[in-house]
Image (cartoon, rainbow, N blue to C red):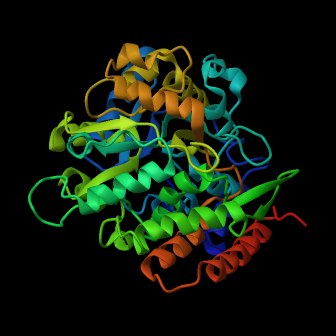
Amino acid sequence: MQRTRWIGAGVLASALVLTSCTSGPAGVDAKQNSKAPLELWTRTTPGGPGEQGALKLAAAFEKSTGFKVKVTAIFDDFETKLQQRAAQKKLPDIVMNDVTQLGAMHSQGLLREIDLDKLKNSKQIVGQGLDSGKSVDGKQFGLPYSAQASALLIRKDWREKLKLEVPQSWDDFAAMADAFTTKDPDGDGKKNTYGLAAPLSTKRGYASWYFSNFLWAAGGDFITGAGEGKYKPSMTTKESVQAVQWFRDLGCKSKVIQPGAVTMETPPTNETFEAGRTGMFVVGPYLLPRFDETLGKDKYEVVPMPKGPKDATVLAEGGSIYLMAGSENMAGQDAFADFAISAEGQKTGMAGEIGFTVQLPVNKTVDISQVRPDPRWKTYADIYQSTGRYAPSIPNWTPVRQTTAETVNALLADCDLDTGTKLKELDKQLADILKEQGIAAS
């Protein structure tokens, strides 16, 4: 998910310094050296499984191509450190980061355009994945290497104990959440369980990120395309208001969301599920290895989200490869991107129970069932293909996500607020953001 706010004028100025030192687009005039080691930054915890996966991918790439790669894992203040490098005119050669970071980095001039004709494996990328790497002008500035979508995790043992069926509708979903909250599904005789785990903090826009799975299923939207690359705010439409009110009622009326959700990011929310305090969790596949170990794979199940008022659309996202401007080894950049999306690179990225860089493959020739026979991964892959939806490619998605997160959070934190009033205020804020980015519909 997206993790930064709108980049301000000061940071943008540093990016302009980077681009103004060349006679053309950033990096065009850099003296090339195909033997120069590549510096790769990946947004993951140093020393963690994500770094291990990146190192494994880099090693396979080096063995296959001969290009050398130095991997640096950074989690905290990733974007700030990237801006510092931009100011020094010494960007890393390659960045592996969230797909939603494309707009911000492109608008700052930090990326070079990707020439798909130079990547022999680019024709094998799934269509929606490839589209996620396009800027608002339709040019390719990001290349997906991993995809994911949201599914519903359910405490299977709780469901079976209470003799409930897998939810097929929002009514079923709400009924199960209520049962998990009120009917003592863990059998300890205490009222200490809740139906839904939800990270609803404003930090990094978590509340909006999570809520999008419900908003889109209701037919609502944060912003709606108006043609010719223009958008308009959409949080006061009938469908959006319905989604907000229904979701808000889960917390304010039914009280089936875990206490303290409005202050929680994903780490503490994850803990509520694995500790047996919550019974449902809408999340991507990256938590399967963790929950298998801490909870036990026999205790929970993975199912598609139930159909909302419109359909079962869920958030799709993933990781993208960005080729940074100013590299002295553009041939190496292209070679790494091509390897990462190849069948070999994808299978390397998926290998292992932990420490993998690829959640769901973006290469159409890779059958996830052949690499990961666990049928739960196939469930996620099917959801991604059938109902997954990426955030729109606008100059910067961050302020949209952050602003909507603040409103969703406020409505869950203070149940006395008027929903309609807050959503009207939100639409005004979104209109200003769209105008600032030059994409507001007239």
- Residue 343, given in percent of the width and then of the height, sits at 49, 16
> Compared with residue 403, is residue 36 higher up or lower down, i.e. above or below?
above
> Which residue is the extreme one toward the front?
163
The image quarter in which residue 109 lies: bottom right
Residue at left offset 20%, top offset 41%: 157
- The residue most toward the right is 442
Identity of the residue drawn at 54% across and 45% down: 314
Q: Is residue 239 visible?
A: yes
Viewer-side residue, 205 vs 157:
157
Left or right? Give the position of 38 relative to 392: left
Q: Residue furthest left?
A: 188
In the picture, residue 118 is in which quadrant? Answer: top right
The answer to whether one can see residue 333 in this image is no
Coordinates of residue 324 in the picture (x, y in percent): 59, 44
- Camera-side residue: 397 or 378? 378
Above or below, 376 against 367 in this view is below
Residue 348 drawn above or below residue 189: above
Residue sitting at x 67%, y 69% = 13
Which quadrant does the C terminus fall into? bottom right
Q: How many marks?
A: 0
Residue 305 vs 260, above or below: the answer is above
| Residue situated in front as seen by the camera: 355 or 54 | 355
Q: Is residue 345 left or right of residue 351?
A: right
Give the side of residue 46 with respect to residue 239, left or right: left
Q: Position of residue 201 (x, y in %)?
A: 41, 69
Coordinates of residue 139 in the picture (x, y in percent): 76, 39
User: Going by the image, does 319 lie left or right of 437?
Assistant: left
